[in-house]
Amino acid sequence: MAYEENFQQTSEPKYKCLLFDIDDTLYPFSSGLATLVKNNIQEYMTQKLGIEEDKSPRTAVGYDFDYDDFHRFVHGRLPYTTLKPDPILRNIILGLPLRKVVFTNADKAHAAKIISRLGLEGCYERIISFETLNPNTNTESLVAATETRSFTANPDSSIQLPKTPVICKPSEGAFEHVFKMTNINPHKTLFFDDSIRNIQTGKRVGLHTVWVGTSHRDEGVDIALEHIHNIREALPELWEAVDDKAEEILDPGKKSPLKPLLKPNSFKAHIITKDMILMTSEKLMNTIIRV
Protein backbone atom coordinates (compact mmCIF):
# COMPACT_ATOMS: atom_id res chain seq x y z
CA MET A 1 0.00 0.00 0.00
CA ALA A 2 0.97 3.63 -0.50
CA TYR A 3 0.23 4.51 3.11
CA GLU A 4 3.56 5.32 4.74
CA GLU A 5 4.22 3.79 8.15
CA ASN A 6 5.74 5.93 10.89
CA PHE A 7 7.74 2.96 12.17
CA GLN A 8 9.59 0.36 10.14
CA GLN A 9 9.45 -2.80 12.17
CA THR A 10 11.12 -6.13 11.77
CA SER A 11 7.69 -7.81 11.85
CA GLU A 12 4.60 -6.47 10.09
CA PRO A 13 1.74 -5.54 12.49
CA LYS A 14 -1.49 -7.50 12.13
CA TYR A 15 -3.66 -4.39 12.19
CA LYS A 16 -3.01 -0.89 10.89
CA CYS A 17 -6.47 0.66 10.96
CA LEU A 18 -9.71 0.67 12.98
CA LEU A 19 -12.87 1.33 10.94
CA PHE A 20 -15.92 2.33 13.01
CA ASP A 21 -19.63 2.63 12.38
CA ILE A 22 -21.32 5.28 14.56
CA ASP A 23 -24.93 4.57 15.50
CA ASP A 24 -25.41 1.77 18.04
CA THR A 25 -21.70 1.07 17.79
CA LEU A 26 -19.96 3.99 19.48
CA TYR A 27 -22.91 4.21 21.86
CA PRO A 28 -25.28 1.39 22.95
CA PHE A 29 -28.60 0.47 21.37
CA SER A 30 -30.17 1.08 24.77
CA SER A 31 -29.89 4.83 24.11
CA GLY A 32 -33.12 4.47 22.13
CA LEU A 33 -31.95 6.59 19.18
CA ALA A 34 -32.24 3.72 16.68
CA THR A 35 -35.90 3.21 17.56
CA LEU A 36 -36.54 6.93 17.19
CA VAL A 37 -34.85 6.96 13.78
CA LYS A 38 -37.05 4.09 12.63
CA ASN A 39 -40.16 5.87 13.92
CA ASN A 40 -39.14 9.13 12.27
CA ILE A 41 -38.67 7.39 8.91
CA GLN A 42 -42.12 5.84 9.19
CA GLU A 43 -43.60 9.18 10.21
CA TYR A 44 -41.91 10.93 7.30
CA MET A 45 -43.42 8.44 4.87
CA THR A 46 -46.86 8.95 6.40
CA GLN A 47 -46.83 12.73 6.75
CA LYS A 48 -44.71 13.76 3.77
CA LEU A 49 -45.42 11.03 1.23
CA GLY A 50 -48.93 10.00 2.25
CA ILE A 51 -48.01 6.32 2.60
CA GLU A 52 -50.10 4.23 4.96
CA GLU A 53 -48.46 3.67 8.33
CA ASP A 54 -48.46 -0.13 8.10
CA LYS A 55 -46.71 -0.19 4.72
CA SER A 56 -43.07 -1.20 4.17
CA PRO A 57 -40.50 1.46 3.20
CA ARG A 58 -40.35 -0.43 -0.12
CA THR A 59 -43.63 1.26 -1.03
CA ALA A 60 -41.80 4.61 -1.13
CA VAL A 61 -40.30 3.71 -4.50
CA GLY A 62 -41.52 6.20 -7.08
CA TYR A 63 -41.90 9.12 -4.66
CA ASP A 64 -39.72 12.22 -4.90
CA PHE A 65 -38.62 14.16 -1.85
CA ASP A 66 -35.92 16.57 -0.79
CA TYR A 67 -32.74 15.15 0.69
CA ASP A 68 -32.18 17.92 3.25
CA ASP A 69 -35.80 17.86 4.32
CA PHE A 70 -35.63 14.09 4.85
CA HIS A 71 -32.59 14.32 7.11
CA ARG A 72 -33.92 17.28 9.06
CA PHE A 73 -37.04 15.23 9.76
CA VAL A 74 -35.34 11.91 10.55
CA HIS A 75 -32.20 13.03 12.39
CA GLY A 76 -32.79 16.70 13.16
CA ARG A 77 -35.44 15.89 15.78
CA LEU A 78 -33.40 13.36 17.73
CA PRO A 79 -32.73 14.05 21.45
CA TYR A 80 -28.94 14.15 21.16
CA THR A 81 -28.69 15.46 24.72
CA THR A 82 -29.39 11.94 25.96
CA LEU A 83 -25.85 11.01 24.85
CA LYS A 84 -23.11 11.84 27.33
CA PRO A 85 -19.34 12.19 26.88
CA ASP A 86 -17.53 8.85 26.96
CA PRO A 87 -14.01 9.45 28.31
CA ILE A 88 -13.40 5.70 28.54
CA LEU A 89 -13.95 5.23 24.81
CA ARG A 90 -11.93 8.35 24.03
CA ASN A 91 -8.96 7.00 26.00
CA ILE A 92 -9.28 3.61 24.32
CA ILE A 93 -9.24 5.14 20.85
CA LEU A 94 -6.42 7.60 21.52
CA GLY A 95 -4.43 4.90 23.32
CA LEU A 96 -3.87 2.88 20.16
CA PRO A 97 -1.28 4.06 17.60
CA LEU A 98 -3.38 2.94 14.64
CA ARG A 99 -5.33 4.80 11.99
CA LYS A 100 -8.98 5.41 12.93
CA VAL A 101 -11.72 6.12 10.39
CA VAL A 102 -15.50 6.43 10.73
CA PHE A 103 -17.79 4.93 8.05
CA THR A 104 -21.50 5.69 8.52
CA ASN A 105 -24.62 5.71 6.35
CA ALA A 106 -25.84 8.78 8.25
CA ASP A 107 -25.55 12.34 6.99
CA LYS A 108 -22.55 14.42 8.04
CA ALA A 109 -24.53 16.69 10.39
CA HIS A 110 -25.81 13.70 12.36
CA ALA A 111 -22.34 12.13 12.47
CA ALA A 112 -20.80 15.37 13.73
CA LYS A 113 -23.41 15.73 16.49
CA ILE A 114 -22.88 12.18 17.72
CA ILE A 115 -19.09 12.54 17.74
CA SER A 116 -19.40 15.83 19.61
CA ARG A 117 -21.88 14.54 22.20
CA LEU A 118 -19.63 11.54 22.93
CA GLY A 119 -16.58 13.80 23.30
CA LEU A 120 -14.72 12.02 20.50
CA GLU A 121 -13.59 15.06 18.50
CA GLY A 122 -10.07 14.60 17.20
CA CYS A 123 -10.13 10.81 17.58
CA TYR A 124 -10.56 10.03 13.88
CA GLU A 125 -8.55 11.04 10.86
CA ARG A 126 -11.66 11.06 8.67
CA ILE A 127 -15.44 10.64 8.86
CA ILE A 128 -17.02 9.02 5.80
CA SER A 129 -20.73 9.92 5.71
CA PHE A 130 -23.60 9.53 3.25
CA GLU A 131 -22.63 12.77 1.48
CA THR A 132 -19.00 11.68 1.17
CA LEU A 133 -19.98 8.69 -0.96
CA ASN A 134 -22.95 10.38 -2.65
CA PRO A 135 -21.94 13.99 -3.40
CA ASN A 136 -24.46 14.38 -6.24
CA THR A 137 -27.47 12.53 -4.83
CA ASN A 138 -30.75 13.20 -6.63
CA THR A 139 -34.31 12.68 -5.47
CA GLU A 140 -34.69 9.35 -7.25
CA SER A 141 -31.69 7.97 -5.37
CA LEU A 142 -33.07 9.18 -2.06
CA VAL A 143 -36.07 6.88 -2.30
CA ALA A 144 -33.76 3.88 -2.29
CA ALA A 145 -31.73 5.49 0.48
CA THR A 146 -34.85 5.64 2.66
CA GLU A 147 -35.37 1.91 2.36
CA THR A 148 -31.70 1.20 3.10
CA ARG A 149 -31.73 3.41 6.19
CA SER A 150 -34.95 1.83 7.44
CA PHE A 151 -33.32 -1.57 7.01
CA THR A 152 -30.30 -0.39 8.98
CA ALA A 153 -32.54 0.75 11.84
CA ASN A 154 -34.31 -2.62 11.86
CA PRO A 155 -32.08 -5.16 10.03
CA ASP A 156 -33.52 -8.36 8.60
CA SER A 157 -31.08 -10.62 6.77
CA SER A 158 -33.96 -12.18 4.81
CA ILE A 159 -34.71 -8.90 3.04
CA GLN A 160 -33.08 -8.34 -0.34
CA LEU A 161 -32.34 -4.65 -0.77
CA PRO A 162 -32.99 -3.20 -4.24
CA LYS A 163 -30.20 -2.23 -6.58
CA THR A 164 -29.71 1.50 -6.33
CA PRO A 165 -27.33 4.24 -7.48
CA VAL A 166 -26.95 5.19 -3.81
CA ILE A 167 -23.58 4.12 -2.38
CA CYS A 168 -23.87 3.01 1.24
CA LYS A 169 -23.57 0.00 3.50
CA PRO A 170 -24.21 -2.90 3.16
CA SER A 171 -23.15 -2.83 -0.51
CA GLU A 172 -19.66 -4.13 -1.29
CA GLY A 173 -19.19 -1.16 -3.60
CA ALA A 174 -19.51 1.23 -0.66
CA PHE A 175 -16.71 -0.55 1.18
CA GLU A 176 -14.50 -0.55 -1.91
CA HIS A 177 -15.04 3.19 -2.31
CA VAL A 178 -14.01 3.76 1.30
CA PHE A 179 -10.86 1.67 0.86
CA LYS A 180 -9.83 3.73 -2.16
CA MET A 181 -10.71 7.11 -0.61
CA THR A 182 -8.81 6.44 2.60
CA ASN A 183 -6.05 4.13 1.29
CA ILE A 184 -7.10 1.38 3.68
CA ASN A 185 -5.91 -2.20 3.35
CA PRO A 186 -8.94 -4.28 4.46
CA HIS A 187 -6.72 -7.22 5.39
CA LYS A 188 -5.02 -4.98 7.99
CA THR A 189 -8.22 -3.37 9.28
CA LEU A 190 -10.63 -4.10 12.15
CA PHE A 191 -14.21 -3.16 11.28
CA PHE A 192 -16.68 -2.36 14.12
CA ASP A 193 -20.43 -2.33 13.34
CA ASP A 194 -23.72 -3.26 15.01
CA SER A 195 -25.40 -4.50 11.80
CA ILE A 196 -24.87 -8.18 10.98
CA ARG A 197 -25.45 -7.46 7.29
CA ASN A 198 -22.73 -4.81 7.28
CA ILE A 199 -20.44 -7.16 9.19
CA GLN A 200 -20.99 -9.99 6.71
CA THR A 201 -20.31 -7.70 3.75
CA GLY A 202 -17.19 -6.41 5.50
CA LYS A 203 -15.97 -9.97 5.94
CA ARG A 204 -16.51 -10.72 2.24
CA VAL A 205 -14.37 -7.76 1.21
CA GLY A 206 -11.50 -8.82 3.48
CA LEU A 207 -12.02 -6.93 6.74
CA HIS A 208 -11.50 -8.38 10.22
CA THR A 209 -14.96 -8.00 11.74
CA VAL A 210 -16.16 -7.00 15.21
CA TRP A 211 -19.92 -7.22 15.80
CA VAL A 212 -20.84 -4.70 18.49
CA GLY A 213 -23.85 -4.97 20.80
CA THR A 214 -23.97 -8.73 21.28
CA SER A 215 -21.88 -11.63 22.52
CA HIS A 216 -23.43 -13.89 19.88
CA ARG A 217 -21.19 -15.16 17.09
CA ASP A 218 -22.66 -15.49 13.61
CA GLU A 219 -21.44 -16.10 10.07
CA GLY A 220 -18.89 -13.49 9.09
CA VAL A 221 -18.22 -12.43 12.69
CA ASP A 222 -14.64 -12.70 13.93
CA ILE A 223 -15.25 -11.10 17.33
CA ALA A 224 -18.48 -10.22 19.17
CA LEU A 225 -18.57 -7.39 21.72
CA GLU A 226 -21.48 -6.66 24.03
CA HIS A 227 -20.14 -3.11 24.43
CA ILE A 228 -17.53 -1.06 22.62
CA HIS A 229 -15.69 -0.66 25.96
CA ASN A 230 -14.81 -4.38 25.83
CA ILE A 231 -12.25 -3.87 23.08
CA ARG A 232 -9.28 -4.37 25.38
CA GLU A 233 -10.56 -7.67 26.74
CA ALA A 234 -11.45 -8.97 23.27
CA LEU A 235 -8.34 -7.72 21.48
CA PRO A 236 -5.47 -7.77 24.00
CA GLU A 237 -2.96 -8.11 21.16
CA LEU A 238 -3.55 -4.46 20.27
CA TRP A 239 -2.25 -3.38 23.67
CA GLU A 240 0.54 -5.98 23.66
CA ALA A 241 1.85 -4.35 20.51
CA VAL A 242 1.75 -0.95 22.24
CA ASP A 243 3.61 -2.30 25.29
CA ASP A 244 6.18 -4.03 23.07
CA LYS A 245 6.83 -0.76 21.28
CA ALA A 246 7.23 1.05 24.59
CA GLU A 247 9.75 -1.54 25.82
CA GLU A 248 11.66 -1.30 22.57
CA ILE A 249 11.90 2.48 22.86
CA LEU A 250 12.91 2.36 26.53
CA ASP A 251 15.45 -0.43 26.11
CA PRO A 252 16.56 -0.78 22.47
CA GLY A 253 19.11 -3.41 23.47
CA LYS A 254 16.42 -5.90 24.46
CA LYS A 255 15.17 -6.20 20.91
CA SER A 256 16.31 -5.30 17.47
CA PRO A 257 16.95 -1.55 17.37
CA LEU A 258 14.41 0.57 15.59
CA LYS A 259 15.27 1.34 12.01
CA PRO A 260 15.46 5.03 11.07
CA LEU A 261 12.11 6.62 11.72
CA LEU A 262 12.26 9.20 8.98
CA LYS A 263 13.13 9.29 5.34
CA PRO A 264 15.42 12.11 4.13
CA ASN A 265 13.75 15.52 4.10
CA SER A 266 10.75 14.16 6.06
CA PHE A 267 9.14 16.40 8.68
CA LYS A 268 7.09 13.82 10.61
CA ALA A 269 9.30 13.72 13.70
CA HIS A 270 6.96 15.85 15.79
CA ILE A 271 3.96 13.72 14.85
CA ILE A 272 5.76 10.54 15.85
CA THR A 273 6.91 12.03 19.13
CA LYS A 274 3.39 13.15 19.99
CA ASP A 275 2.01 9.70 19.25
CA MET A 276 4.69 8.12 21.43
CA ILE A 277 3.71 10.36 24.34
CA LEU A 278 -0.04 9.87 23.93
CA MET A 279 -0.27 6.24 22.87
CA THR A 280 2.29 4.14 24.68
CA SER A 281 2.23 2.34 27.98
CA GLU A 282 2.12 3.84 31.45
CA LYS A 283 5.75 2.89 31.89
CA LEU A 284 6.79 5.03 28.96
CA MET A 285 4.62 7.87 30.20
CA ASN A 286 6.32 7.80 33.59
CA THR A 287 9.75 7.83 31.97
CA ILE A 288 8.85 10.84 29.84
CA ILE A 289 7.51 12.67 32.89
CA ARG A 290 10.71 11.98 34.86
CA VAL A 291 12.79 13.32 31.96
Image (cartoon, rainbow, N blue to C red):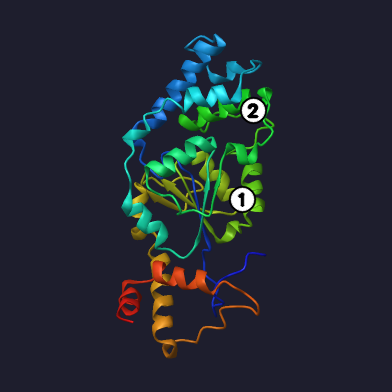
Q: Amino acid at mark 1?
A: Val
Q: Give the crowd class for mark 1: few <14, some 14-19, many >=20 residues within 10 Å.
A: some
Q: Look at the image and tell me whether residue 55 can be seen.
A: no
Disc marking residue 62 = none
Quadrant of the rendered structure where residue 291 is? Answer: bottom left
Picture quadrant of residue 159: top right
Residue 135, image x, y percentages: 66, 36
Q: Is residue 175 left or right of residue 238?
A: right
Residue with the most extreme bottom position = 253
- Tell me if residue 89 comes above or below residue 167 in the rendering: below
Q: Residues within 10 Å of mark 2 (few under 14, many from 20)?
A: few
Secondary structure found at label 1: loop
Q: Residue at coordinates 39% horizontally, 83% vertically from top-left?
A: 250
Q: Quadrant of residue 137?
A: top right
Image: 59 above or below 104: above
Mark 1 or 2, nearer chain start: 2
- To which residue does mark 1 refer? 205
Are the residues flagged by discs 1 and 2 in contact, CB closer than 8 Å?
A: no
**Residue 222: x %, y % from top left:** 47, 53
Residue 183 seen in render = yes
The tag on residue 162 is 2
Q: Looking at the image, which residue is at 49% across and 46% down?
A: 219
- For badge 2, the amino acid type reads Pro
Is 42 above or below relative to 9? above
Q: Position of residue 87 (x, y in %)?
A: 32, 52
Q: Secondary structure at mark 2?
A: loop
Q: Position of residue 10 (x, y in %)?
A: 55, 80
The residue shown at (31%, 76%) is 289
